[in-house]
Image (cartoon, helix red, strand yellow):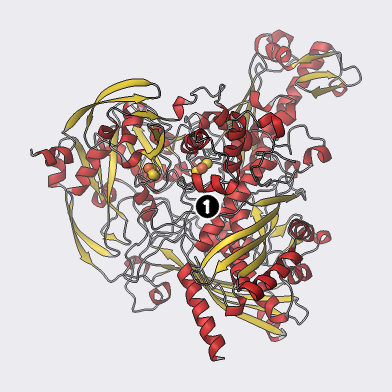
Amino acid sequence: MTTEHTDTTEHTDTAQKSGYKYIGKDRKRVEDPRLLVGRGGYIADLKLPGMLHAAILRSPVPHARIRSVDATEALKLPGVVAVLTGEDCKAKMNPCMNFGPATVAQYPLAVDKVRYVGEAVAAVVAESRYLAEDGVDLLEVDYEDLPPVTDPRAAMEPESALLHEEHGSNIGCERTFEFGDVNAAFAGADLVVEDTLHWGRSAGMPMETAGAVAQPGFNGVLEIYCNSLNFSYFSFLIAGALRVPSNKLTMKPVPAGGSFGSKLAAHKVPTLAGFLALRVGRPVSYVEDRIDHLVNSDHHGCDRFYEARMGFRADGTIVGLDIDVVDDYGAYMQFGVGHHGNAFSQVVGPYRFRDVRYRLRAVLTDKCQQGAYRGFGSEVHNWVLERLVDSGAARLGLAPEEIRRRNFIQPDQFPYTIPGGNVYDSGDYPAVLDKALSMIDLDRWRAEQKRLWAQEGRCIGIGLATTQERSVFSSTEFWFLVEKPVLPVTSSPESATVTIDPTGQFQLMLHCQSMWGNSPETVGATVLAEEFGIPPESVNVRYADSAHALPSTGPGGSRYTVMVAGAIRGASRKLRKKLIHIAAHTLEVAAEDLELVDARVQVKDAPETGLTLAELAGTAYFFALSLPEGMTSGLEESYTYDHPYTTLPAPDGSDFGVFYPIMGHACHIAVLEVDPDTGIPSFLDYVAVHDAGTIVNPKSLGGHVTGGATQGIGTTLYEELAYDEDGQFLSWTFRDYLIPTAGEVPPFRIGHVETPSPFTEYGVKGGGEGGRMVAPAAVSAAIDDALREYGMRVRQVPVKPSDIVAAVQAGTVRAEAG
Amino acid sequence: MTTSTAAKYGTARRTVTMHVNGRDVTREVSTRTTLADFLRDELDLVSVHLGCEHGECGCCNVLFDGHSVRSCLMLAVQGDGHAVETVESLSVDPTELHPIQESFAEEQGLQCGFCTPAMVLRTKEIIETGHEMTDAEVRHEISGILCRCTGYQNIVNAVQSAGAKLRGEAAADGAAGGRS
Ligand code: FES
Ligand code: FES
């Protein structure tokens, strides 16, 4: 066969090394068959009897007082059932859940004022979505324009118009964290590099938008089906907003067609659908269209302006980091500024320096609010850190790999406490770097680069970057972003329920909505298979609704694999104990002499004597008199797994405690060519090596790496949720917001390194975000390297062809003038 | 109401007959109903996913007389007299997947599954051209459908593997999607 084909994933030998039967092997995903026949069960597929549809009128202006909303014509339209506005919200509900100051309150429909283009102003509920949109067209709103607040730096000035008058300023959060002696570190440095950097707004932008169907049910219970995540953690807050007792709100899990953080908070969409359903007394479906999602998704990703400095000794040792970041937070606070907590959990990256200052000002502007996007703010920090390290290396004449090697935390230094108090559990950063270098022939590429420039004027660049990937957050991280925590929460558990039915078949119940493209069912089935020696495909996986769910936090922060593995293992251990006791009683053998092997409990030295799970299950369910004394019938156990390693923050802020200790690591090397005339980069090679601890399924993890790296490339080169100076939104469609297609991304070559975590079951670490966290730094470095003759320096992303051409022209002019 | 007002408010209706997944269906529809909504809402073919409704994401891809179209950009009435295939035409039984679907499962050419029916149908169309394609050509051919999850690598592998399988070559050398 002649087809040229890239073999992308390197084999790992976890399974062989560890002796695991299922963990560490490439296995098909259990989620896939139903998805492949088009029965994913997404929110838009849900139809309930009598269901109505909502469409939303969105603000065309960035900042204005709402004088009136006239629904007269809309209400005349046959099929339109109701029109609701912010006035109705103010009268009938409490503000939405909010992790920021109470003075920055938000409702699902704007109350009194609109604060960004696209903010929801009124909802029309009708017999069909078509009719609801007709109704929206007929609404008349009278706005009194206010000055738009668009530049976050100007927004901090006292004369700026205020978004939230009752808040008294446009600064939502201001904190300075300092660890070590930063001034002394910089005073003693041989070299200080400084940079002004901007990370532009992008977003998770899953192919499926957010949606919810709410239904007033029996006994005053409101049911909300939604594809938002985390709802077993947050549903009581949604109930509070809707003035429904928390035991009378049931959130029903619906698999999501991707999230990448964008559906994390369970916020605007389900709250709005619930509100509308309560008002009209019928089921209401609200599924965002793409415009709804682009302009007013639950949140956009980060939008940050940095003044950053890094100090070095002459030998390349990093001595300190000083960051001043202005975060353009948009109109509401929502998740507080959890992004910076994430950044702080890995503030020194993989490097050993101790002196850090981090000044943060999160500023309110007339834009959609910020929230999670794969990396959740630490990807931005990593880009800044790696930009500075590369600057230092260039000035000191060190190769990118060399400066990193000289500064890495060493394998024998773990567990390693970073400034601020977070702990990195384990790692072998030189091994990851070595592996990446071994997969790419750097010397050849560097020679090619020289040759092609000299002979053909072609611009080839090689970019190497590393990242930490903190995973498995503890909720204590939210403490330090406010002076006094409103909710000083410490727990972020995950639960699992394992049931063996009377015939010995397994059901696994997960307690949150976790199917969003990651592989929770595959992970769950694999772990259960490992514990009981059963085929993973035989496990049936279900999701509890919030009325049945045990404590769970959901995915996010690359935590799910670690946490659910811990929960399933805990539940399995309880069940195994019960099975062994039943077998001991039945066989009249001491429990210590029995073991569970391949779905059978047998005598250790005489495996021919034993009982299958099916035989034991039959006894457990139907023969109570054959059970050991005091044992009750049935085979079901649940286990709630708490964060494997959390410590409390110091009350005086001198230490944040341990809140994100499970630390992965990655190194990417991008080789690309930039056409200096068109400014268009194209990839020649791309190597990605990740260490996510013990790997459950190498192929699935590889998929997360390529997917994440593709989003990272999108962030670096294409994607932008743009606003103009007047606050007008410029990215209304996928023609404006450019998601990478198959033609724009390289065939990734993936390698794995495994340093198991000492703190988690099986040694698993999170791996969902790393790809997006490191690709922007690697691609930025490669662009700089390709255009080094022109003096290119990527200072903002996305870096667009026009930026590159402008830099080339400026560089050319400079070269000629010089 | 004038005709245009009738169309605007969905009161203008027409009868359409379409050959969908191998059988003829006749329905009376509002003239403004999109083909995508017709397939989803009238025929319950929920594999047709709407990712953007403005012709950019390709998730609503169906085969229209054998060729890919974006069903969000067409009206149901335009389908009158034509043949439409959705992923339900391959297999609706998760335990009996079509070889193309099976290749996607083997190669993990999907994560959330939202772009997947569109990608599977596009693969069918690509394979039916009979041309053996390089990875770069496959990338070009699927670039009209956005996938936010996979980074495309495993989709390319799945397309190649399905092509090889359907051409009876899979056993011969295992090169497509093979792991040497
Ligand atoms: S839904 Fe038709 S192209 Fe996006
Ligand atoms: S698998 Fe999620 S969009 Fe392609």
Residue of label 1: A743
What residue is drawn where x is 64% and y is 80%?
A193
The answer to whether any part of residue A85 appears in the image is yes
Quadrant hosting residue A720 = bottom left
Say few, some or many: other residues with alpha carbon within 10 Å of mark 1 (under 14 / 14 to 19 / 20 or more): some
Q: Where is residue A64 in the image (x, y as percent from the top left)?
A: 25, 64
Look at the picture and state if A69 lies above or below A77: below
Task: Please name the amino acid that badge 1 sits on.
Answer: Gly
Q: Where is residue A434 in the image (x, y as percent from the top left)?
A: 78, 59
Q: In which quarter of the image is the N terminus of chain A?
A: top right
Q: What element carries label 1?
A: loop
Chain holding disc 1: A
What residue is drawn where x is 21% and y is 34%?
B31
**Foreground residue among A375 and A673:** A673
Q: Does the residue labelled 1 lie within 8 Å of ligand 2?
A: no
The answer to whether any part of residue A791 appears in the image is no
In the image, is B18 to the left or to the right of A513? left
What residue is drawn where x is 51% and y is 77%?
A807
In the image, is B55 to the left or to the right of B93? left
In the image, is A349 to the left or to the right of A56? right
In the image, is A16 to the left or to the right of A151? right
Seen as rendered, the residue at the extreme left is: B1
Quadrant hosting residue A341 = bottom right
Q: Where is residue A763 in the image (x, y as percent from the top left)?
A: 75, 45
